[in-house]
Image (cartoon, helix red, strand yellow):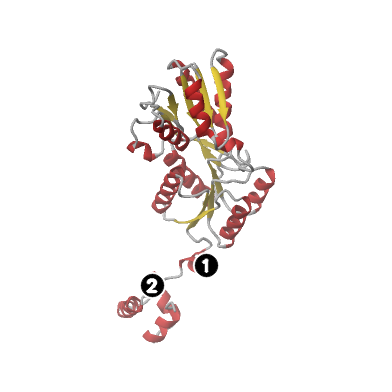
Amino acid sequence: MSVTTNDIAKICQVSRTTVLRALNNQGRISEETKERILKTAKELGYRPDLLARGLVKGRTMYIGVVVFDVKNQYFAQMLSAIETEAQKQGYSVNITLHDKNKTKEIELIRKLADYHMDGLILSPVNEGEEFAHFLKNLGIPLVIIGNKVSDTLPFVGIQEKEAAKEAVEKIIKTGYEEVIFVCPPLGGIDEGNIFTHRERLAGFCDVIAANTKISSQILSNYDYIEEAKKIVKDSGKKTAFFCSGDIFALEIMKELKKIGMKTPRDYGIMGFDDIEFLNYITPRLSTIYNSVEEVSRTAVKLLIRQMQGESVSMNYFENYHIIDGETL
């Protein structure tokens, strides 16, 4: 059973108000009494109920975060940056995972609201105006990160479409005659909010449309590995893959290596996100740095500004840039 301020007051033979003054270092109280109370609290292992204290003050100093998962290194980097920045600003973080389950996500958001989080940072699987309306009606400051929901909700990310266009243009300028866009989430059943992938697809399509001599394909299913093998074997053209995620690129590299095909000798390949794991992979994957740490820190700062009553813009974009690896 946890120790309460009433327990300390009883042992020290003082009022609960006097105990609170000593613990909070506030109000008039003699040094002797204060020291006796603090010593007793320490001996009993007293820990303050920060949530209850926060509710009295009108804030809990907690930020709720709802994301896909922590197995994906992109989200692991995101959560690490959010927690670090939040702690720097004096806030703790309550992290929950929706596992791409739309119903679960809404339940988690409601639960965090019921726990009186001061604000929310969401990387959502839900989308559409109905979901946007639900979020607005919570009456809690929030920021969307990664997968945009609505122009009426604060969003932090990068210019996904422009980044993809630059990547495809670089591939073509390198001399590739065929560019394959790899994005399994596009073909998934009820994948939910895949805003980032749709934007990357749009960038790919724009560049291909402007370069009519370039052959192209889109691999939008999770059997993309076998399709990639067939393309490299049968194409007869200088082929490069542009993957809407580093993990897809790494899977292709791994499986093609098993059948004796290497990059960039037999094919080119480029990822997206620049996850930290790439630092340990040879050859170093060419990719796009998507500023996940900067995006996450900005999301925390933007949320805190809202919690302090400031008005904020609806769209914040961090910089991105191409990482010249060894696979093109």
The quarter of the image holding the N terminus is bottom left
Question: Is residue 86 at least partly visible in the picture?
Answer: yes
Give whichever of 54, 94 is nearer the camera: 94
Q: Is 108 situated above or below 198?
A: below
How much space separates mark 2 and mark 1, taking CA atoms?
16 Å
Report the number of numbered marks: 2
Question: What residue is shown with label 2?
Answer: 23
Residue occupying image coordinates x 66% and y 47%: 131
Give whichever of 43, 238 is nearer the camera: 238
Q: Amino acid at mark 1?
A: Val
Q: Residue 66 location in percent, x, y?
A: 53, 51
Question: What residue is shown with label 1?
Answer: 56
Q: Which mark is on residue 214? A: none
| Neighbourhood count class around disc 2 (C-alpha, 10 Å): few under 14, some 14–19, many 20 upward | some
Q: Residue 230 location in percent, x, y?
A: 51, 26
Residue occupying image coordinates x 45% and y 42%: 74
Which of the marked residues, 2 or 1, is nearer the chain's N terminus?
Answer: 2
Q: Residue 158 location in percent, x, y?
A: 50, 34
Residue occupying image coordinates x 69% and y 46%: 130
Q: Amino acid at mark 2?
A: Leu
Numbered disc 2: secondary structure: helix
Q: Is residue 28 left or right of residue 163?
A: left
